[in-house]
Amino acid sequence: MTGHDSVRLSALAFSEERPMWELASPIVAVSARRTCAEVDVMPDESSGVVVVDGERIGRLSRRRLEQKVQTRWGLWRPRARTPVGRLADWDVPVHRSSLSLAAAVEAVLSRPGDRRYEELLLRGPNGDWRLLQAGAVLEALAVSMARRASQDELTGLLNRSAFFEHLHELALSLTGTGRRLAVVFIELDRLKQVNDQLGHNVGDALLVSVARRIRATAHPGDLLARLGGDEFVVAMTVPAGTDSDAHALLHRISGRFLSVLRQPDPGLDSRAGSTASMGAAVSGHNSGASAVETLLQEADLAMYGAKQAGGDRVVVAGPPQIFEDLQPQPVEGRLSRSMHRALAENELVLHYQPILELVSGRITAVEALIRWQHPSDGLLGADRVLAAATVDNALMEMDLWVLRTALKQLRVWIDLLGERAPDWMNVNLSTDTLAHPDLANEVLAAVAESGVPIGRLRLELPETTTLDLAEGAPEQLQVLLAAGAQLSLDDVGAGTSSLRHLATLPVAEMKIDQSFIGRMQVEERARAVVEMLTNLAGGLSITVTAEGVEAVEQLRQLIDLGVDHVQGYFIAPPAPAAVTEAVLTAQQLGVEPSLLTTGIARTFFLPD
């Protein structure tokens, strides 16, 4: 793809209703009565010509034209005087120049397999013609997916995952510049009341209004995101200065956001206003990535302090004692125990979620998911565990614990259940662990210790690693692949990686991000994305697993689309080993017979 194409695709990503006409290349139209020789002497058109015969529209490719006109030595054939109408392909659908991306994807995927990747013919309002390559449609869809995956659909701001990715990049870019990183957490004080009293439509309008006002108040270059619900965040850089100078500046900046949100929006119901509680923090003079987690915790805790103090105010994080004054109890993301201690005292546990193969109706794999049985906070989910491991620089230690524990459990199931044991154990690896120079030795040692054949291990790679691995897996992964381990690419579509990298990344399984599965019932585009990914994976001999299946209608659509495997709460929730073992023994997962297509061996029941 040329640089000009890249610019056009990037522009398309921010305007999905923009027609595909601008991605198509011009093609000449000729009368069906023109001879092959006459057409052949026209300016070279690598795509051939459009053939017009009254109301009929056909196409003659350059390759077919040259086959009829010239011999291999460049001499004219006798058939060179044949009218092009006799040689044209008249079975060519014609689309309007206003063809949208969604319609283009549907047009590509609805064609027979042997013609799926042929060009689309577009007709302009002035009678001009263009050809749209199927590859350009898929590229545009990939860009659109990346944009949607990084953008909050309601407000248009960055979403949580994209914000944290960009924030770490911003922090790294500040190294050696003398500037400091600052964040402002913003939480509305009255969204719940607005939703309860006026309805969620009005609440959504309030969120859109808040996002618009935050965007108008922020400076160019600031990172703006909606983290979810009524939580927003702004990240920026500030001059080095002294701590007191930085705190004073941050207080003024936060005050501007507070002031603009206090003002009523004339476009909203007069009862739909809301003030906000804000917490702000600025990093130390070392603004590298290692300082980001601490900075976020400080801002989050400061916001909680503003909320506890009655809301409609800003609290700027200062010395550590401010945290004790504002919030003595543990809060989200701030745990009283370290990950190292949790590992040492055996507080971590694994839950397992089955992955069902639709063709056979069998559980072919399980994914190991970490939990923390915290002595005071109860059972904590993976997000809390990962956050603590990141802060404590314990990600690899945690990943290896998960790997060893999961493989030992698979060994138990193999011995106990025989053929009913899962074929693969899926284990997640963080990017920190993937980059470790001793990764291969650690994994091979864990496999040898468990006695499980290495071919039954699938290492799940975060989707964000795709770009790093696209030009060939790092040496450590190459060693593991050579030994027989399999790779699974997680959350495909959730990040900004291009789909083309699936062709070069040696993965055995591709897991479609649950955000697309969840939207299939209400968004044709989401369904088209799932279908496109499924077809693409099939062409690359990659197994497809749909994540986050939570409803019967989603399962029906996935079966219709030919998805290989499904995973989600509708199939079976993550559960302790003993519960999962019972499910493996029964192989009864709650799927009714009518959902399973012809050729599926097993049938299941649908719970009430």
Image (cartoon, grey):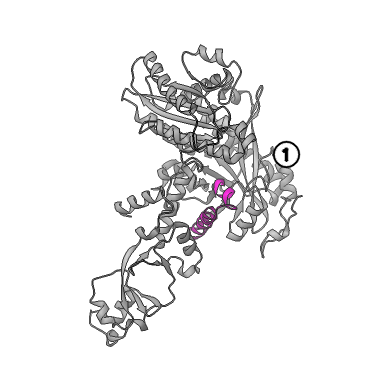
Question: Which of 281 and 605 lies nearest the eye of the viewer?
Answer: 281
In terms of image quadrants, where is residue 577?
top right
Q: Position of residue 452 (x, y in %)?
A: 61, 43
Question: Which of 452 and 37 lies nearest the eye of the viewer?
Answer: 37
Question: Which of 562 and 262 lies nearest the eye of the viewer?
Answer: 262
Work out whether residue 247 can be spotted: yes
Using residue 314 as the reference point, say whether residue 193 is left or right of it. right
For disc 1, the marked residue is 578
Type of the residue with mark 1? Ala
- Report the span colored magenta: 514-540
**Split into 4 quadrants, where in the image is the N terminus?**
bottom left
Density class for disc 1 (Cα within 10 Å; few <14, some 14-19, many ≥20) is few
Could you tell me which residue is drawn at 53 percent across and 31 percent down?
Answer: 231
Q: Residue furthest bottom?
A: 78
- Magenta stretch holds residue 524: yes
- Magenta stretch holds residue 140: no
Secondary structure at numbered mark 1: helix
Residue 443 position (above or below residue 355):
above
Q: Position of residue 30 (x, y in %)?
A: 31, 77
In terms of image quadrants, where is residue 128?
bottom left
Q: Position of residue 576 (x, y in %)?
A: 69, 37
Work out whether residue 503 can be spotted: no
